[in-house]
Amino acid sequence: MDFAWTDEQLAFRARVQDFLKTHLPADWEHIAHGPASKEQSAFAKTFCGALAKEGLLVPHWPEAWGGCDADPWIAFILAEEMWIAGEPRGGQYMNVNWIGPTLMLFGSEQQQQQYIPPMARGETLWCQGFSEPESGSDLASLRTRADKDGDSYKINGQKIWTSYAGDADTCFCLARTGTGKNGISIFLIPMDTPGITVRDIPSIIGEGDIHEVFFDDVVVPESARLGEEGQAWEIVGKALSLERVGIPRFALASDTLRKAVDILKQADRLSSGAMEQAAKAHAACEAAKLYSYSIIDQRARGKIPGPEASVGRFATVNCERQVAEFVVEHVPEAISGEHPMLLAHHQRGIVAGVASGAAEIQLNLIATQYLELPREPR
Ligand SMILES: Cc1cc2nc3c(=O)[nH]c(=O)nc-3n(C[C@H](O)[C@H](O)[C@H](O)COP(=O)(O)OP(=O)(O)OC[C@H]3O[C@@H](n4cnc5c(N)ncnc54)[C@H](O)[C@@H]3O)c2cc1C
């Protein structure tokens, strides 16, 4: 792999940095924490609209959908700069990374025309209705039902931990239309459909971030189903593989560590123990970056990343956790809000390895698919 950036990539990064300088408000640091707060979601709409006008929201999308067919490195450089800045796109990063591209692959003409252009303009917020009270890692056990009734479906059940649900326009929702893994279908459900109730879950990662979503006799037309009945497993596998390599959380972790070390240096509080811990956390951030880059390199060469994508994901969780622990131990005043950007990382770091799927599941995949270790006989 050649690690040097091309002139075009350097110029693109500088363009994104300039955009951030001119479009983030002076009080951005105070908006940035609470990864899905109402304030941040509201700001994201204005910010993403401006990004779209500048051609910086979906540059990697096909021209036909408002992009410019940029290669995966351009999308990753964009995402790195967004994450270093505290991800001002809010929940819209999901549209850009995987919801839009998934609709391009599997959506009907009507679904594509209805949903993709507003995403490309930065106008809509989606939520991901996968997890349920008894189904997180074991998603195949989900129980929300979609019962066919003529040319519509009646949906009943409950989702939990749904980020952005309080402000989302549409839910990318999984529901059961049959039995087993192949009995799950996807529905694109406007959140103002009668029968949907959203309840905030109070949490230490910030108010308004995670929710319970209840579906009571929610009626949607057949045209709200994405793909065929029972095709969810295939579509979600594809969608999540797009998401997994799309989130450079290590970039925020690395920048947070640098800020924390600067604070300690300026206050003459950087002990040798802290220095050693910072060096280990820095090495973890670099490892996560290199794994992520090797995956992007494969994608740029037209290859489909294999099980090493799980290694990249686990390395990212590991570095976020190490940086979060460093900050708690050495700059504890950050957690009470004295350094808002450090708090923003902390809120993400403490749920790393849970929020977008349990880290232990990645370890299982690494053991079986990457290291090819045998399963313990039962
Ligand atoms: C901040 C936050 C935001 C979230 N946002 C969303 C969202 O927008 N949409 C959504 O659908 N979900 C969301 N989630 C839910 C998240 O995807 C789940 O929490 C996650 O998949 C884990 O599922 P669970 O909570 O049911 O835990 P479980 O799956 O019950 O896991 C509990 C523990 O058991 C371990 N475990 C489970 N199975 C295995 C196994 N096979 N081998 C080894 N260990 C195992 C896990 O690692 C974990 O430590 C969010 C969660 C958080 C914390």
Image (cartoon, rainbow, N blue to C red):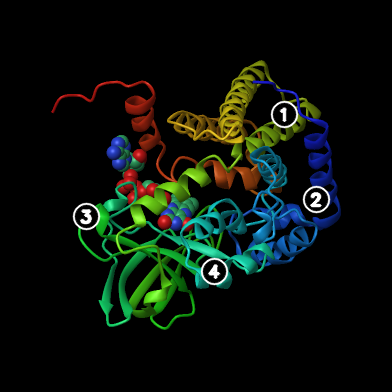
Residue in the foreground of this view, choosing between 288 and 40: 288
**Mark 2 beta carbon near ligand 1 (under 8 Å):** no
Disc ID at residue 180: 3
Decide: is 273 above or below 236. above
Q: Nearer the viewer, mark 4 or mark 1?
A: 4
Sequence order check: which comes first, mark 4 or mark 3?
4
Checking the image for residue 261, the label placed there is 1
Q: CA distance from mark 4 to mark 3?
A: 29 Å
Q: Which mark is residue 168?
A: 4
Select label 2 or label 1 by which is in front. 2
Say which quarter of the image contains residue 179. Answer: bottom left
How far is mark 4 from mark 2, CA to CA? 24 Å
- Percent of width and height locating residue 107: 48, 63
Amino acid type at image mark 1: Val
Looking at the rendered structure, the secondary structure element under dot 4 is loop
* Residue 20: image tag: 2
Q: Amino acid at mark 3?
A: Gly
What residue type is disc 2 on? Leu
- Tell me the SS state at disc 1: helix
Marks 3/1: CA–CA distance: 50 Å
Q: Secondary structure at mark 3?
A: loop
Asked whether 167 or 247 is in front, the reply is 247
* For residue 227, side relative to residue 250 (left or right): left
Q: Residues within 10 Å of mark 3 (few under 14, many from 20)?
A: few
Residue drawn at x 71%, y 61% is 48
